[in-house]
């Protein structure tokens, strides 16, 4: 896969984006919900206005033509997943939240 597009107008977290980034795929997602928590527009992927097919087509065209940008998104996406969405860190953070709530 060369490109992952998640056009959902409402998405809880955008797990498909996280999985694609971890797999070394450049990503484009709708600027909505949890997707904007995963993609930093122009840094590790593109966000487009939800429902705006012209904006989406433009972003796809840019990444199709610009291999260097696509490769940059791939490297930065993998890095983000390792830093922010690592399973061990996620489990520890979840445990910490539950522990804190149990103390109350």
Image: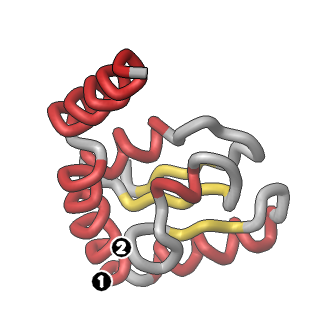
The residue positioned farthest toward the right in the image shown: 51
Please tell me how crowded label 2 is: few (under 14), some (14-19), or many (20+) other residues with Cα within 10 Å. Answer: many
- Quarter residue 103 falls in: top left
Image side of residue 71 versus residue 42, left or right: left
The residue sitting at 45% across, 46% down in the picture is 17
Spatial separation of the CA atoms under disc 2 and disc 1: 5 Å
Q: Quadrant of residue 51?
A: bottom right
> Looking at the picture, does residue 92 appear above or below residue 21?
above
The residue positioned farthest toward the top in the image shown: 102
Quadrant the C terminus occupies: top left
Which scheme is used to colour this image of the protein?
A: secondary structure
Q: Residue at x 33, y 79 (%)?
A: 67
Secondary structure under the numbered disc 1 in the rendered image = helix
| Number of residue marks | 2
Which percent across, then down, holds residue 85?
A: 29, 44
Q: Using the image, tell me which numbered label, if any, was put on residue 70.
A: 2
Image coords of residue 34 (percent x, y): 58, 47
Q: Nearer the viewer, residue 65 or 54?
A: 54
**Compared to 84, does 68 lie above or below?**
below
Local packing at callout 1 (Cα closer than 10 Å; few below 14, some 14-19, many 20+) is: few
Closer to the camera, 10 or 73? 10
Above or below — where is 14 with respect to 42? above
Numbered label attached to residue 6: none
Q: Which residue is mark 1?
A: 68
Q: Position of residue 22 (x, y in %)?
A: 26, 46
Asked whether disc 2 touches disc 1, contact meaning CB atoms under 8 Å apart, the reply is yes
Looking at the image, the residue that sits furthest to the front is 104
User: Which residue sits at x=67%, y=56%?
Assistant: 30
Q: For the residue labelled by badge 2, is the local secondary structure a helix, a strand or a loop?
A: helix
Quadrant in which residue 76 is drawn: bottom left
Q: Is residue 75 left or right of residue 41?
A: left
């Amino acid at each position: 896969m060369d490109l992952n597009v998640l056009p959902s107008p409402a998405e809880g977290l955008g797990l498909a984006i996280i999985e694609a980034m971890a797999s070394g795929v450049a990503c484009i997602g709708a600027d909505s919900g949890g997707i904007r928590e995963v993609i930093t527009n122009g840094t590790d992927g593109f966000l487009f206005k939800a429902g705006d097919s012209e904006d989406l087509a433009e972003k796809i065209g840019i990444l199709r033509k610009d291999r260097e940008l696509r490769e940059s998104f791939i490297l930065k996406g993998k890095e983000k997943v390792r830093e922010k969405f690592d399973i061990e860190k996620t489990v520890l953070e979840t445990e910490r939240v539950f522990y804190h709530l149990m103390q109350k």
